[in-house]
Each structure stands twice: as C-alpha cells, then as structure tokens.
Image: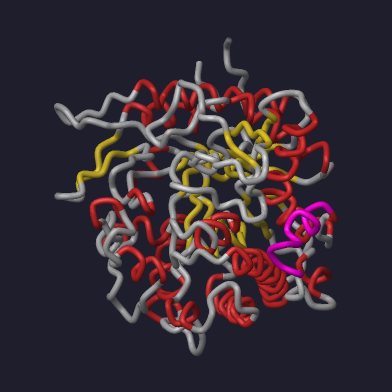
C-alpha cells in the first residue's frame, strides 16, 4: 500500500533520554541518580554496563545536533537530568547544568529544530530516593521546585514542556518488580509512587505555567498499553480490563479526568487503602494538556488464571522476569507470537491504529503525538554501513499506522522515532540497539543505519514512497 503524504506542518522528530546518552556522570556538579546506583550494583544490569559514558553526548552534543539537522527532523525530544540541575534534588540550581541545556536548545533553534523537553525520564537524584523516593509525597513537591527552575532558565527556548516520561515504568518497574532503578519490590509503594507521579505532573505544570503563562505548551508522555483478551470469555475480557486499569487508567484518570476509576481502587484494595491520596490532590493532577504524548512498541494478550495457579508469564513485556502488575496475580500474558523484535516484543502496527483512534474518541479535541516508536534488532557494522531491513520494515508499518489513524480522524500531529542513536537500554545495558544511528561504543563513532536514510526521506518529504 502506498503511504499517503503527511501535511507539511506534521512534526517529524527523534528522541533520547539523559541517562541513556549523556555520560559525564560526575562532571560539572552533577550528583548521583538512582540509575547510577542501580547500574553499579552487581547483577542489576546486563554485562555490568553503566551509563557512566554512554554516548558521551555531554561532550559530543554539537555533533549530535548536526546529525539531527542532516536528518531533517523538525523537533528533538530530550530529557533533562535532574541531578545535573540539583545534585541533591533540592536547593539552588547548578548553573553549569543549566548552561548545558541552554546551549543545546540554542543550537537546536539555530538549526530550525524545536526543543521538546522532558523534565523527568527516570533519573531521580539518589538523595531523594534515600528520603523515600517516589512513594514519598515530598518528592512531588521537590519536583515542582525543579520544574520552576527549568521554566525560569529555559522558558524562552522550549517549544513543548513534557512533565514525565512513562510514569508506569517508574512506578511499577522501579518499585514493584524491581527490574529498574531503584530496584524495590514493594507493591503498595508502587501504587503510592504512581499517585505521587500524578501529583508531581500537576504541580510541575502549575509551576511552569506560573512562570511562563497559561498558554505555555505542556504535555505528558504515557506508554499506554494495548491489551487484548486471549479469548472472548468474560474472564479473559476482565483480565484485560484489569491490566488496562493498572496500566492506563491509573494515569489517564487523574491527569485528564481528575479521578481514580472505581474498578482500579477495587482491584488494588488488598494492596493499599489509597490513603496517600489527600483532599485536593485530584484537582492538582488534572491540568490542561496542550498535547498528549503516546509511546507505543507492541501489544499484549491477557487471560485469567485460577487463584493459586502458578503463572509463568513475563509481565507482558518480554524484558521482566516476573510480573510488575500489582494486584493482578490472577492475570497471565500469552507468549508473544512472531515476528518479534530483539526485545522479544511482538510487531503489531494495528495496535497503534487502535490506540490512537481510541484515545482520540475518548478525548475529542486533544492533540496527540507519537513520542516514541521504534525497534531493536541486532546490528552489524560492516564496511562503514549498517543494513537493517527489519527496522526499516517496522518503521514503514508504523508510519502507515499513524497515517491510517489520521485518516480515521485522530488528531495526530507528530511522530518521534526512538531513538536518535543507540544508547544505554536500561537493564539491558548496551545489548539492545534502537538507534537510527549506530554507535561504536569503543570509539564513540556515529554511523547512519539504512533506517536513518529512510527516516531522512520521510522527514524531508512527508512520504515513504
């Protein structure tokens, strides 16, 4: 099928995250983050990899902006390392940290690339974790102070302010399954963390708009799940509903509707009494959004198992050894069917169509952007080239899915490829590559993959034809 042309004002971008690319973890006043601690803990990250150097973006950022300029993208989604701004997560700002992001944003603007800033992409200052982390209410208020610092320092440079990236991962993988930093396995704490992330989102957007004005373009990025029942049975349909409540409703409800769904509260009643939700919180969590960012990679199929029956599923993600779904002990995920990416995730572009059109129907008039989409495959650098036909095919299929969703009426205004370049892939270390650009971690040399040339054509023409 021929890809329809996207309109000239459609935003083509690419994305990264601070801990995954910056390195320089001890330079210029940066304090330790939970990912510094976690990655240096034996057995937590594959091969003992750390983000100490990563892509050395902190020292090579000008080269990386040149790559983006040559790609022809119109926007760059990046995150700020909180401990680079406040080493202890509170107190005065570190000017050298602010200057780094100022220079980055200025160079992007010079090249006609809109800076899309994410305030929090998982690298919590270790000092705040030592005081309780996201399960502690105070962390949300420290985040609001951090947001105000960034708004004052960078306000005239940033196109879109994104409060959080994938709070699901922060809450569940960090505090329930423990496969991400800080590595805790405390189900009740995970739900408290989810609420305090919602609260931080609201407080942060209030702080940004107090500094920059009510019309400031603000967003949040959620990894909304597409979970299908394994069969048409009522039991399996309810299993899928339960996972969607834990994965989607726990953030959509407070952020966009100012409420927690009754079924979510009922499903988790044995885990927590939700007493951490204080009066007025849900007025704060619900802040007007200029755009909702959606990250999408794959789908899951869920079924109900009998209480006490042993579950052998991987949590529906292929990268966790046990389920992070607190309060869902009787839900099991089917093994994904091929074709699979190197992450073990299935490839189902129809899931992106369904997610975008369903979200648009539920929240009419809300602008949507695909803020992450991409695939990991084993890459081989040979003769100064990386041929990655599977990644090209994945890109083509999912761009077509975005086009189909737009044709069906979903107001999708942008797409950000994950990722600009290979990087530290969290608990997988450097063993998984998502980049458009290949990184030789020994030399830090950047090499365009075939998919990068394909994306260049897309960004410049709005078409894959």
Which residue lies at the image location 70% right of the left edge and 74% below the top edge?
A: 203
Asked whether 49 falls inside the magenta stretch, the response is no
Disc count in the image? 0
Residue 362, given in percent of the width and then of the height, sits at 83, 41
Residue 340, given in percent of the width and then of the height, sits at 44, 26
Q: How is the image coloured?
A: secondary structure
Residue 299 or 234: which is nearer the viewer? 234
Residue 57, given in percent of the width and then of the height, sits at 31, 58
Relative to residue 263, is residue 239 drawn left or right? left
Q: Quadrant of residue 463?
A: top right
* Residue 256 visible in the snapshot: yes
Residue numbers of the magenta segment:
263-273
Which residue lies at the image location 29% right of the left edge and 59% below the top edge?
A: 43
Asked whether 269 falls inside the magenta stretch, the response is yes
Q: In the displayed image of the protein, which residue is found farthest to the front? A: 308
Residue 97, given in percent of the width and then of the height, sits at 40, 75
Which residue lies at the image location 55% right of the left edge and 42% below the top edge?
A: 310
Residue 129 or 162: which is nearer the viewer? 129
* Residue 65 visible in the snapshot: no
Q: Quadrant of the N terminus?
A: top right
Relative to residue 233, is residue 100 drawn left or right? left
In the image, residue 390 above or below residue 159: above
Q: Quadrant of residue 104?
A: bottom left
Residue 267 or 306: which is nearer the viewer? 306
């Amino acid at each position: 099928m021929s890809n329809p042309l996207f309109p000239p004002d459609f935003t083509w971008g690419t994305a990264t995250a601070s801990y995954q690319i910056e390195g320089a973890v001890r330079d210029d006043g940066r304090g330790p983050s939970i990912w510094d601690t976690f990655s240096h803990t034996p057995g937590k990250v594959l091969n003992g990899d750390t983000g100490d150097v990563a892509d050395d973006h902190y020292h090579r950022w000008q080269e990386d902006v040149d790559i983006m300029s040559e790609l022809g993208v119109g926007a760059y989604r990046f995150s700020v390392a909180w401990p680079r701004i406040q080493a202890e997560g509170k107190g005065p700002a570190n000017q050298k940290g602010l200057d780094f992001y100022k220079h980055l944003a200025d160079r992007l603007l010079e090249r006609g690339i809109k800076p899309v800033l994410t305030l929090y992409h998982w690298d919590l200052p270790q000092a705040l974790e030592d005081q309780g982390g996201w399960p502690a209410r105070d962390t949300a208020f420290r985040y609001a102070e951090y947001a105000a610092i960034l708004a004052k320092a960078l306000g005239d440079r940033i196109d879109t302010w994104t409060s959080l990236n994938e709070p699901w991962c922060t809450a569940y993988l960090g505090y329930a399954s423990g496969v991400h930093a800080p590595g805790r396995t405390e189900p009740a704490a995970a739900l408290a963390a989810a609420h305090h992330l919602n609260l931080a989102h609201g407080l942060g957007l209030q702080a940004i708009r107090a500094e920059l004005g009510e019309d400031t373009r603000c967003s949040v990025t959620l990894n909304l799940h597409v979970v299908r029942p394994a069969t048409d049975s009522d039991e399996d349909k309810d299993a899928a509903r339960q996972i969607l409540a834990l994965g989607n409703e726990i953030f959509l409800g407070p952020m966009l509707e100012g409420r927690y769904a009754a079924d979510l509260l009922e499903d988790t009643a044995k885990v927590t009494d939700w007493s951490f939700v204080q009066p007025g919180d849900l007025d704060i969590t619900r802040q007007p959004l200029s755009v909702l960012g959606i990250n999408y990679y794959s789908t899951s199929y869920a079924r109900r198992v009998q209480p006490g029956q042993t579950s052998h599923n991987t949590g529906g993600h292929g990268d966790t050894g046990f389920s992070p779904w607190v309060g869902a002990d009787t839900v099991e995920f089917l093994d994904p069917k091929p074709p699979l990416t190197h992450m073990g995730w299935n490839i189902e572009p129809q899931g992106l169509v369904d997610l975008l059109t369903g979200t648009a129907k539920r929240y009419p008039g809300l602008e949507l952007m695909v803020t992450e989409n991409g695939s990991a495959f084993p890459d081989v650098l040979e003769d100064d080239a990386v041929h990655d036909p599977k990644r090209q095919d994945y890109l083509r299929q999912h761009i077509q899915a975005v086009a189909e969703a737009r044709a069906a009426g979903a107001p999708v205004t942008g797409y950000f490829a994950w990722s600009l370049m290979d990087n530290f892939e969290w608990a997988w270390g450097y063993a998984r590559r998502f980049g458009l650009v290949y990184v030789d971690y020994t030399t830090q040399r950047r090499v365009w993959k075939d998919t990068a040339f394909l994306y260049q054509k897309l960004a410049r023409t709005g078409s894959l034809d």
